[in-house]
Amino acid sequence: DVKVTQSSRYLVKRTGEKVFLECVQDMDHENMFWYRQDPGLGLRLIYFSYDVKMKEKGDIPEGYSVSREKKERFSLILESASTNQTSMYLCASSKRHPGLYGYTFGSGTRLTVV
Amino acid sequence: KQEVTQIPAALSVPEGENLVLNCSFTDSAIYNLQWFRQDPGKGLTSLLLIQSSQREQTSGRLNASLDKSSGRSTLYIAASQPGDSATYLCAETYNQGGKLIFGQGTELSVKP
């Protein structure tokens, strides 16, 4: 069963900590994405990547960075966690041209920053 | 700016009822549209994908349609069950490598 795996379901971190959220896909997808989801604001795109070592800013990149050293892994980094980054984080992947198969999402990471 | 709207925001129906969820979009030049299901606290599960050249897709009790000229997609759920209770999200892309643009979702509750 093909899938996108997010390493943690729940995380609690302290303000100012550096936080790594990991995402791995086993579908040989070229594209990978990080979203955050908040009540009333829906899903918002943080960063995405079309290839290894490539990254593009999404709609809300401030306070975040990403790393894609291998095709199957896309990491989201919170350089200095803040309480307003408490959210549900969702990783997704797709083929380079997702017209036929669409997007596949992971099960999410609920991050709480205290 | 492309926008996706889902109405209603919440819907409650008795078990066994057939129902329709609506999704509208502002730009008819879409590439594809995808319907997802999200259970509370969980990730998104893909239900159906409709490419721009298609008018509908079916999977079991689910049928999704796409009308580009009117800027609308609908998700039809036949013979609803309590296990169908979840939030349903539609999302579209506007080019081959495009990003998803999401609606706000419809929270469905099916009462036994």
Image: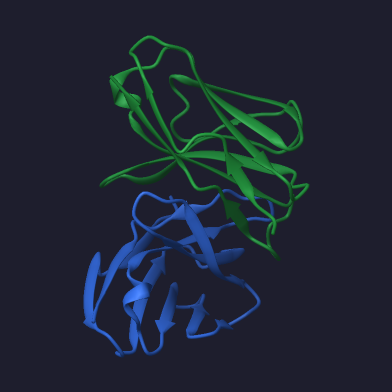
Q: Nearer the viewer, residue B42 or B71?
A: B42
Q: Indicate the quadrant where residue A80 lies.
A: top left
Residue B28's place in the image compared with B80, above or below, is: above
Observer able to see residue B29: no
| Residue located at (29% from left, 21% from top) | A83
Q: Colour of chain A?
A: green
Q: Colour of chain B?
A: blue
Label total for image: 0
Q: Indicate the quadrant where residue B39 lies.
A: bottom left
| Residue located at (61% from left, 63% from top) | B31
> Would residue A89 be found to the left or right of residue A34 on screen?
left
Q: Where is residue A90 in the image (x, y as percent from the top left)?
A: 49, 42
Q: Where is residue A98 in the image (x, y as percent from the top left)?
A: 68, 57
> Would residue A86 be found to the left or right of residue A19 on screen?
left
| Residue located at (34% from left, 89% from top) | B18
Q: Position of residue B102 (x, y in %)?
A: 43, 55
Q: Nearer the viewer, residue A59 or B18?
A: B18
Q: Where is residue B112 in the image (x, y as percent from the top left)?
A: 23, 82
| Residue located at (56% from left, 35% from top) | A7
